[in-house]
Amino acid sequence: MDVAEKPTMNGIPCGEPGEPMGDGVRTSETPVEGWGPSPRRHVGFGFIAAYTLAYFGMWMALLTPITLSLALKIRQINPEVAAGSLSLVLGGGAFVAVVANPFFGRLSDRTTSGFGMRRPWLVGGMVFGTMGLLVIAVAPNVTLILVGWCLAQLSFNALLAAIVALLPDQVPVEQRGRVAGSSASPSRSGL
């Protein structure tokens, strides 16, 4: 296989498991150059509880408006065309979410700040997402609801990208299933 044909991950040659690579053979556990090693220290109950609560809170803030609040608010403001207005708001928010999540995921992977790699996106996503929900709460018309929901989607998807990336950043491989399961279960039961 020619060097130009080798598989890459973000431009870094990674090869296939079992294939000779450099001065050794790549296994599924061999870290790819440029990607950090898996954390070695086990996370305790405090981290798992905080991660689970943060994940649950983020989903509750994002899903409650979709399932209940937006429809009620729009029906209150504009009952004649509530279905069309709700479709516009939800469609606009969905478009923003589809673009925002990978965008902020890439940004959070490359962030180098004094506050850490993920923390600015976690805090900023929560603050601006809450502001978006407040805009919806006081909105006198559908246009402002659309603006508030797009801000909430943009911000909470920045938060989501950072919180999901915390799992491989902070949790060793042997604990990831347990932590992912503990964080996903309450968020699904809250729906």
Image (cartoon, grey):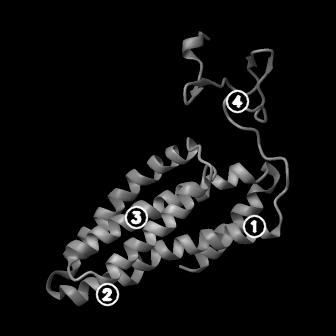
Tell me the distance, in whole angstroms, between the alpha carbons under discs 2 and 1.
Answer: 35 Å
- Residue placed under numbered mark 1 in the picture: 48
Q: Is residue 171 left or right of residue 1?
A: right
Label 1 neighbour load within 10 Å: few <14, some 14-19, many 20+: some
CB of mark 4 within 8 Å of CB of mark 1?
no
4 or 1: tag closer to the N-terminus = 4
The residue wearing badge 4 is 32
Dot 4 falls on a residue whose secondary structure is loop
Q: CA distance from mark 3 to mark 2?
A: 18 Å
Q: Residue at x 71, y 38 (%)?
A: 36
Q: Earlier in the sequence, mark 2 or mark 4?
A: 4
| Dot 1 or dot 3, earlier in sequence | 1
Q: Position of residue 83 (x, y in %)?
A: 22, 78
Kind of element beneath mark 3: helix
With 42 as the anchor, is 55 left or right in this view?
left
| Residue 113 position within the rendered picture, expressed as x and y whole percent measured from the top left | 59, 47
Q: Residue at x 33, y 57 (%)?
A: 95
Disc number for residue 72: 2
Q: Amino acid at mark 3?
A: Gln
Identified by mark 4, the residue type is Val
Residue at coordinates 70% horizontally, 65% vertically from top-left? Answer: 181
Residue 13 x, y percent position in the rendering: 62, 22
Residue 27 at x, y percent in the picture = 78, 30
Please tell me which of labels 4 and 3 falls first in the chain.
Answer: 4
Tell me the amino acid under the disc marked 1. Ile
